[in-house]
Image (tube, grey):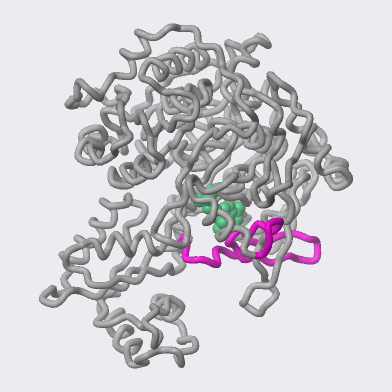
Amino acid sequence: MTTDRTRRVEDLLAVPSFAPPADFREKALVNDESLYQQAAADRLGFWAEQARTLHWDQPFTRVLDDSNPPFYRWFDDGRLNASYNCLDRHVAAGLGDRVAYYWHGEEGEERAVTYGGLLADVQRFANALKDLGVRKGDVVGIYLPMVPEVVVAMLACARIGAVHNVVFGGYAPEAVRDRMQVSGAKVLVTSDGARRKGRVSTVKDNLDGVLGEVESLEKVVVVRVTGSTVAMRPDRDVWFHEVCAAADPVCPAEPVEAEHPLFILYSSGSTGKPKGILHTTGGYLTGVSYTHRLVFDLHPETDVYWCTADVGWITGHSYVVYGPLANGTTSVLFEGAPDYPHKGIWWELVERYRVTTFYTAPTAIRACMRWGAELPARHDLSSLRLLGSVGEPINPKAWTWYHVVIGGERCPIVDTWWQTETGAIMIAPLPGVVSTKPGSATRPLPGISADLVPGDEGDDSGLLVLTEPWPSMLRTLYGDDDRYVRTYFSRGARTYLAGDAARRDEDGYYWVLGRVDDVINVSGHRLSTAEVESALVSHPEVAEAAVVARPDELTGQAIVAFVTLRGGAEPSDELQTDLRDHVAARIGKLARPAQVVWADELPKTRSGKIVRRLLRDVAEGRELGDVTTLGDAGVLDRLRSQLANTG
Ligand code: WT7
């Protein structure tokens, strides 16, 4: 059977486009063009209608204030609370016993968290935060593994108007320190430890070495996850379960202005300094609930939805927490990795929870392809009716494998293009309406206006831009309005530059080609070359470093680091390992270079600027581009022979 399927994948690779299956279309929330037409005819009216699906404590009368572009304000005379919208209104509607999350632990533990249970936990922790001195507008850091408490912590912040700043659990303590410092966090919520593939890491102990440097930090709340012993500092550290037990169980949600900040999420940009992307309450919640409902064709009474992203990324914020909860969804929340305790665990869980809607990243699909179609074939995947992809362009081979082997050829695939900055999905098919083409995110959603502007490639591609503001857009870069304007609006205050190149075909479908800036996409995660370079040069033996990406079959892109050593230091395999570990320790494992190339010198222009374009040519073994700007063209030949030796 699996060989049949492999053959089928090969056959279908020739098919350019897939129409929505008739029975899917029949039951879909949207199955004609009317929503596109409605949004095109009255964009603001359309968004107002979407916003009104939320509960507003004070209804808004103004939809968009665009008097000071690119600082846009949405629904700004309205008041609402995100936690109320995610919890209380469902409980008030009699859905308190509905499961919000089937949590599944690494060792097979299970917890069904209901909307009623989540509301009770969130109220207690919201009061606990208040008891610790957290007030509306204060920043609360969250650094937790994939346990239900991470959702509790986020919603507790939202409940009292505190601004959360979640740091992905895979980031290193120093990255946590930096993000707490620049956001001025008052409290950090973390855990004693975290489990990863059967191993326990001592999260709190690791943090203790750096948290002293965060001046603004007053309290650290520790969730007991692994039972590891931790050294609690009596003046600073408290246990999550103790503060919750001591807190009042009732905490009414505080209505905040629509433009009140909901969260900051740091993401890599072109420089070494991460960007604090700021999202606010009303517009963000409007965007994520609308897109989650329509892109995933949500039927909340019958669907079981699973987005495999970690809550520490924007995909987790928007499509594990806020979108699904705002819509009263039942989701799966999985603590673990896709290959632990075995490489078929995802499909075991799809069968176990009868998952209907599954949303993951191309890199994960490619890993599953490599592990073989036999693993999913051992499980009953017939509950699935819709599949999603996010994070990077999906190659047609992986798309088709996903379609055949996981989707059994019945499930539409929604390839969703968006970014931390956009808050919510921007380009994706409405699955009951739009035919899909493997590798294309298809058309902008109703309410979203995209276009291409000429870049400097000189071919038929262009720079992907969004030409009208949208409710879930970032509002600024935290504490740096100038950088916000400079980074995204260099072509005018109505033209949002995404930083991606794209093509548009004769049907108006967008084909995203990848980043045009110094951002690298490893396994759907964003890293900046400058960030990795500064981690490298912080190593005592390194004089200079330049980082580029090369294509990788599994991770999409992989990091290649060109390194020149300080006088006296000698290249060696040990040093290579040491440097890779050093980057992992400074930033996180996902930033570990795949390859370190020793260089006597780096190719530079006469004015001393490193020419990364040529390093990319070297890393990919390509013909060199224009070398006339180089100070010394011989550098590249020497580099090539060094690459051959270290390859
Ligand atoms: C960058 C944003 C928001 C999702 C998680 C990543 C790339 C994302 C797609 C897609 C082609 C994609 C783009 C984008 N990207 N989704 N479906 N097709 N490229 O969020 O870390 O903010 O990264 O990811 O290059 O600019 P992010």
Q: Is residue 251 above or below residue 392?
A: above
Determine the residue positioned at 80% across, 44% down: 433
**Residue lying at the far left of the rendered structure:** 568
Asked whether, in this view, residue 458 is left or right of residue 376, the answer is right
Asked whether, in this view, residue 270 is left or right of residue 472, the answer is left
Query: Which is more toward the observer, 311 or 523?
Result: 311
Q: Is residue 544 above or below residue 119?
A: below
Q: Is residue 387 above or below residue 12?
A: above
Quadrant containing the C terminus is bottom left
Q: Position of residue 479 (x, y in %)?
A: 48, 46
Q: Position of residue 373 (x, y in %)?
A: 50, 48
Asked whether, in this view, residue 216 is left or right of residue 393, the answer is left
Quarter location, residue 191: top left
Marker count (numbered): 0
Q: Position of residue 111 (x, y in %)?
A: 44, 19
Query: Which is more toward the observer, 543 or 35?
Result: 543
**Residue 564 colored magenta?**
no
Determine the residue positioned at 60% across, 25% down: 256
Quarter location, residue 49: top right
Determine the residue positioned at 26% across, 28% down: 192
Determine the residue positioned at 57% across, 39% down: 279
Quarter location, residue 319: top right
Residue 394 visible to an observer of this rendering? no
Residue 227 visible to an observer of this rendering? yes
What are the residue bounds of the magenta stretch?
491-520
Asked whether, in this view, residue 510 is left or right of residue 574, the answer is right
Q: Position of residue 440 (x, y in %)?
A: 67, 58
